[in-house]
Amino acid sequence: MDDMTDRYRALEAVILGNYPGADLARIRAAYEYARMAHETQVRKDGTAYVTHPLATAEIAAEIGLDEDSLCAALLHDCIEDTEATHADIEKLFGKDVAEIVEGVTKLSKVPYSNKEEVQMENLRKMLIAMAKDIRVILIKIADRLHNMRTIEFQTEAKQREKALETMEMYAPIAHRLGMQKIKWELEDLSIRYLDPVACAEITEGLKLRHVEDEEFTKKVCSRITERLDENGIDGAIHGRTKHIYSIYRKMYGENKMLSEVLDLYAFRIIVNDIADCYNVLGYIHDMFRPIPGCFKDYIGTPKPNMYQSLHTNVI
Ligand code: MN
C-alpha cells in the first residue's frame, strides 16, 4: 500500500467516526478525481499536491461536515488549478458539490490587502458567500488551516501576508462560527510569523514550566472531581494551559511578563443539565475565590451563535 492510500484510509476512518452514514464510494471517487487532476502538481514541501485537498477534507471531517462538503473539500482546488470545469464536477458529483467548489474558488481570488476599504470588501464577499452556503466558508477555513500548518515552506513575505490575513479575517470568522479549537490554532500559527521573537520567548517560557503546569492542572481537576463526586454530580473536566496567542495578548496588551500573567489555565466542566451548571458554579466559587466582575452567564444570555455556558475567573 502506498503512502497516499494510507492517507486516504486515515480520512475514511475520521469520516466513519463522525458520519457513519456517509457514502464512502462517492467520497473515494472525489479523491480519485482530485488525485488524477492534480497528478503533475507538487507542493512547496515536495509532496504530491493531492495531500493538500486530502488534509483539507480531513479537517472538514473532523468538524463533522456532510458528504457533499467532503467531496467539495477534496475537489476544492480543481477548478482553479486544473483542467476541471464546473460542468465536469457537476456531472460527476452533483450541483451542490460544484457550487461549493465554485464558491471556494471565488473566495481564493479575493486579493488580500491591509487597506481598510479593501478589507471591508473582502469581508463583505465572505459574508455573501456565507449567506449563500455556509459550507463554502467552512471548507475555506479548513483549507486555510492546512495551508497555515504547512506555511514554513513559503517565502517570508508570503508567510507574513497569509499570517496577517489569517489573524484578521479567518480566526475571527472561525470564532464567530463557534469553532474555538480551530480559531486557537489559526492564531497560534499566525503569531509565529507575525511576531516570531516574542512567540519563541513564550514557547520557551512555557516549555520551562511545562511539568509544573501539568501538575497544577491535574491537581485542580482532581479537586473539582472530588467535590462533584461528593455531591453526586456527573461531570467531565478538562484542564489546559491557555494557548500561545491568548498569553501573547495578555503580555503585550497589558505589558506583563509571562510570570505575571495570572490566568494561564482554563478549565471546562461539562455536566448533564442547566441546574447542575449553576450548582457547579456555586461549588467552584466556594472552593476558589472568584474575581469580582468576571462572571458571565451565557446560559441566561446566550451568545449570538447560540453558545451557552457559564464563565468565571477564580484565584
Ligand atoms: Mn486549497
Image: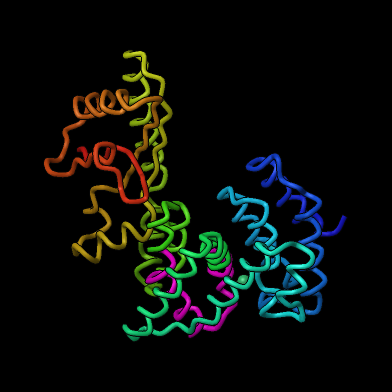
Going by the image, does 61 lie left or right of 193?
right
Residue placed most toward the observer, 303 or 36: 303
**Residue 291: percent from the left, percent from the top?**
15, 40
**Residue 138: percent from the left, percent from the top?**
53, 60
**Residue 34: percent from the left, percent from the top?**
76, 68
Is residue 214 shown above or below 82? above
Residue stretch in magenta: 145-171
Residue 28, quarter of the rendered image = bottom right
Name the residue rendered at 70%, 67% in the picture: 75
Is residue 243 shown above or below 149? above
* Residue at the extreme left: 292
Residue placed most toward the observer, 7 or 114: 114
Going by the image, does 292 lie left or right of 251?
left
Is residue 278 shown above or below 81? above
**Residue 193: percent from the left, percent from the top?**
44, 74
Name the residue rendered at 30%, 23% in the picture: 275
- For ligand 1, the image quadrant comes to bottom right
> Which quarter of the image is occupied by the C terminus?
top left
Residue 161, quarter of the rendered image = bottom left
Name the residue rendered at 71%, 45% in the picture: 22
Residue 89 in magenta stretch:
no
- Note whether residue 312 is visible: no
Name the residue rendered at 63%, 62% in the picture: 56
What is the number of callouts on the image? 0
> Which quarter of the image is occupied by the N terminus?
bottom right
Residue 151, quarter of the rendered image = bottom right
Q: Main secondary structure of the magenta part?
A: helix
